[in-house]
Image (tube, grey):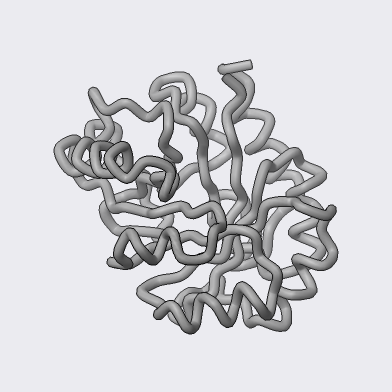
């Protein structure tokens, strides 16, 4: 199975286009104001408008209320939602858009519980397993936290880089991988060469 690749924390049109050129399957735009990769609504709208029609763009939210998420969806044209808070399952279903739910996986028990909950929720969301410190930390997810956990429907994130992503994909066989800081020259500034290398390496071991 061809691994799905998402480049997160996009803030500039040029970086979004470079991610597409690199072969990414989706990008993420961060609407959490506490993040160093925060992107305002107007800039996000320009990014979405510059992409090929229908290219998947996920808006990243942390404990944002339904009103704020609806506002961003309407204002920017994003086609997916990534939840990093304690939003209820109903929130994942509200907009009829693809949803990624991020979970901090500090142990195999926590990761396994998250996978079981995702399976029980049916098609409400796609699970993303991150390091114990959460999204954007740059801390690599502990391998032992994923030992024995089925990742065929899950996305792995947390400290991924062009140098380590091939081993992660080969060893864990996840549905997808997600990267932000590992392909940057500075926070929120992507490096086109690193993005190409990341995508290529992610797919080198699984065809």
Q: Residue 80 vs residue 68: left or right?
A: right
Total tally of numbered discs in the picture: 0
The spot of residue 201 in percent (x, y) is 62, 28
For image coordinates 36% across by 45% down, the residue present is: 129
The spot of residue 130 in percent (x, y) is 36, 49
The spot of residue 14 in percent (x, y) is 81, 62
Q: Residue furthest left?
A: 109
Among the 4 quarters of the image, the one containing residue 199? top right
Q: Residue 111 vs residue 41: left or right?
A: left
For image coordinates 25% across by 43% down, the residue present is: 117
For residue 167, say whether it is visible.
yes
Among the 4 quarters of the image, the one containing residue 174? top left
For residue 136, say whether it is visible.
no
Q: Is residue 152 above or below residue 14?
A: above
Q: 97 and 101: which one is in front?
A: 97
Q: 37 and 61: which one is in front?
A: 61
For image coordinates 32% across by 49% down, the residue present is: 131
Q: Residue 157 vs residue 190: left or right?
A: left
Among the 4 quarters of the image, the one containing residue 184? bottom right
Q: Is residue 168 above or below residue 75?
A: above
Which part of the image, by quadrant, shows the C terminus? top right
Q: Is residue 203 above or below residue 133?
A: above
For image coordinates 49% across by 54% down, the residue present is: 99
The spot of residue 169 in percent (x, y) is 48, 26
Q: Is residue 67 above or below residue 118?
A: below
Which part of the image, by quadrant, shows the N terminus? top right
């Amino acid at each position: 199975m061809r691994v799905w690749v998402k480049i997160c924390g996009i803030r500039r049109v040029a970086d979004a286009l470079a991610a597409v050129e690199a072969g990414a399957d989706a990008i993420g735009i961060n609407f959490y104001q506490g993040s160093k990769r925060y992107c305002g609504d107007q800039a996000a709208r320009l990014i979405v408008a510059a992409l090929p029609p229908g290219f998947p763009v996920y808006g990243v939210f942390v404990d944002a209320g339904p009103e704020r998420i609806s506002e961003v969806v309407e204002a920017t044209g994003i086609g997916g939602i990534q939840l990093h808070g304690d939003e209820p399952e109903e929130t994942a279903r509200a907009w009829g858009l693809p949803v990624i739910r991020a979970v901090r996986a500090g142990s195999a028990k926590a990761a396994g519980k998250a996978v079981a909950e995702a399976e029980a929720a049916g098609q409400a969301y796609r699970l993303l397993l991150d390091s114990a410190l959460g999204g954007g930390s740059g801390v690599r997810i502990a391998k032992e936290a994923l030992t024995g956990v089925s990742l065929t429907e899950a996305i792995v994130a947390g400290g991924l880089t062009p140098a380590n992503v091939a081993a992660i994909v080969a060893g864990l066989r996840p549905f997808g991988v997600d990267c932000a800081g590992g392909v940057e020259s500075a926070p929120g500034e992507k490096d086109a060469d690193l993005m190409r290398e990341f995508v290529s390496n992610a797919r080198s071991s699984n065809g």
